[in-house]
Amino acid sequence: MPKKDHRKCISCEEFYHRDEMYMSAGASSFDEWVCETCYYEDQPCCSYVTPTCEYNGNIGSYNRNLDDPLWGDPCYDAIEEHADSIEWKSTDAWRGYFDGKVPDGYVSMIEGWTSGGWGGGTDEVNDFSDVWENNKQCFEGLRMFVALYRTSNVFSTSVDVYVHNQDVDEFKRILVRDAIDEVLND
Ligand SMILES: [Zn+2]
């Protein structure tokens, strides 16, 4: 029988006093509490970047740290919706990756992998990251965000780029324009 006001941590399963615990982010019930250690040691499974937010946010299994600049972002609601949908997908007993669902009103424009931050991944992601690194300001004003997911391979990050359906045409125009510029400058 647990002591008064003590609850079981859903991660380590030890009992702690309620005042020393955090409610699990995205918890479906009021009984999902996490102890302080588990809360802070929780590894982020996804982080977000938008055209105007250099820093972003992390979503862990139990905590959710979406940074202040993101609160005013036009994608904030979509990111919250996405954060709620993140699940671990296992490809075999040891391997897998996190993935989330496309938020309402958004389209998944780019999906792939990258290793060591940007570059060195799938072609589509590499092409996009080139434009993003060099001409990020082009994307300002678009309702879009990049989700970077943790995978079981520490050198590999899974990437999704979501764009609001009304901004898809402009998003495509930016990528095409950049590809043309590259050809012209070669
Ligand atoms: Zn714990």
Image (cartoon, rainbow, N blue to C red):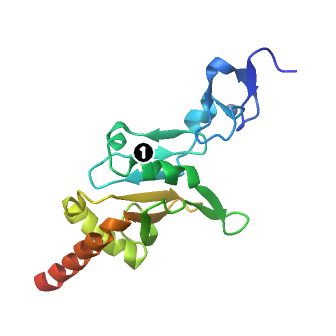
Mark 1 neighbour class, 10 Å CA radius: few under 14, some 14 to 19, many 20 or more: many
**Image x and y of residue 8, in percent:** 75, 29
At 72% across and 32% down in the image, what residue appears?
A: 31
Seen as rendered, the residue at the extreme top is 4
**Image x and y of residue 97, in percent:** 59, 62
Q: Is residue 177 above or below residue 17?
A: below
Left of 22 or right of it: where is 126? Answer: left
At 69% across and 37% down in the image, what residue appears?
A: 29
At 29% across and 48% down in the image, what residue appears?
A: 54
Seen as rendered, the residue at the extreme left is 185
| Quarter assignment of residue 26 | top right
Q: Quadrant of the N terminus?
A: top right
Considering depth in this image, is 15 or 153 the residue closer to the camera? 15
Callout 1: helix, strand or loop?
A: strand
Residue 115 visible in the picture = no
Left of 80 or right of it: where is 152? Answer: right
Which image quadrant shows ligand 1?
Answer: top right
| Quarter assignment of residue 116 | bottom left
Q: Quadrant of the C terminus?
A: bottom left
Residue type marked 1: Gly
At 33% across and 66% down in the image, what residue appears?
A: 166
Q: Is residue 170 above or below residue 35?
A: below
